[in-house]
Amino acid sequence: MKPFIGIPAYTHTYSETGRPYYRGYVPIVHAVEQAGGVPFLIPYDLEDTNLRALYRRIDGLLLPGGGDIHPRFFGDEAPHPSTNIEEARDEAEIKLIRWAADDDMPMLGICRGCQIMNVALGGTLIQDIPSQIATDIAHDFPNSRPRGLTAHPVTIVAESRLAQIVGEAQIMVNSWHHQVIDKLAPGAVLAAQSPDELVEAFEIPSKRFVISVQWHPEDMMADDEASRKLFRAFIRAAQS
Ligand SMILES: [Mn+2]
């Protein structure tokens, strides 16, 4: 049986009509399929018992990219003018992540998913790299940039699970984030960092498979073996 991979869908209301829709990022769904999993989109704004019922059907949880996380979830009292905050999404994803952590369900976090996983498990974020950190590295490229284009290298921590999976000490990754992890959650360890020493990936060694990356491997699948290896390792873990 192929494993079911839960992917929280988010809502989007079209300004022209005011009608709300659920949305999921197509390349993530395709990446899960290519790696051997069955994608399972989860509408998050459900009654708790229904969210829990959907959760119980999945074998792995994939937290996708998206807008910023409300700073109240990581105890920051000075909100930066952040973009696309959807607190109901934050709340539902935090619930799903905590359930999955308690059950030792395999999890893969991507970009916002990396950040919300860290927050859900007790870590914090830097709200805005450009205004809070001196760095020469561009982490937040314009949306017009082709998604498969790499932006900066990351150094993978030797001995990490990520290093075992990827089999390389350094890889090139894309980058579309203006937020980044500050303090790692208890139990989480650094798995990769950019040359300016920002957290680009973390993992939780005590869990069967919990890895989060700040880049978007789903957008690099076509040309990048490291991205394919990461998705395949996640699906394999969800299958076992
Ligand atoms: Mn980056």
Image (spheres, rainbow, N blue to C red):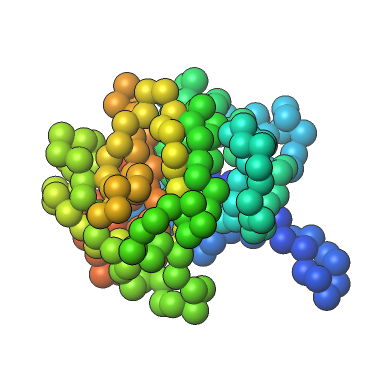
Q: Which residue is drawn at 21% across and 36% down?
A: 160
User: Which quadrant: the N terminus?
Assistant: top left
Q: In this view, does 95 lie to the left or right of 119?
A: right
User: Which quadrant: the C terminus?
Assistant: top left
Q: Which residue is drawn at 15% across and 39% down?
A: 158
Quarter-of-image position of residue 22: bottom right
Q: Which residue is drawn at 77% across and 69% down?
A: 14
Query: Residue 156: x, y in percent?
Result: 21, 46
Judge whether 34 appears above or below 183 on screen.
Answer: below
Does residue 21 appear anywhere in the picture?
yes
Query: Residue 237: x, y in percent?
Result: 32, 35
Does residue 40 appear anywhere in the picture?
no
Q: Residue at x 37, y 29 (%)?
A: 188
Q: Which residue lies furthest to the right in this view?
A: 17
Judge whether 146 appears above or below 83 on screen.
Answer: below
Q: Is residue 137 left or right of residue 155?
A: right
Query: Residue 221: x, y in percent?
Result: 32, 64
Q: Residue 46 or 129: which is nearer the viewer?
A: 129
Query: Residue 11: x, y in percent?
Result: 71, 56
Q: In this view, does 173 lie to the left or right of 110?
A: left
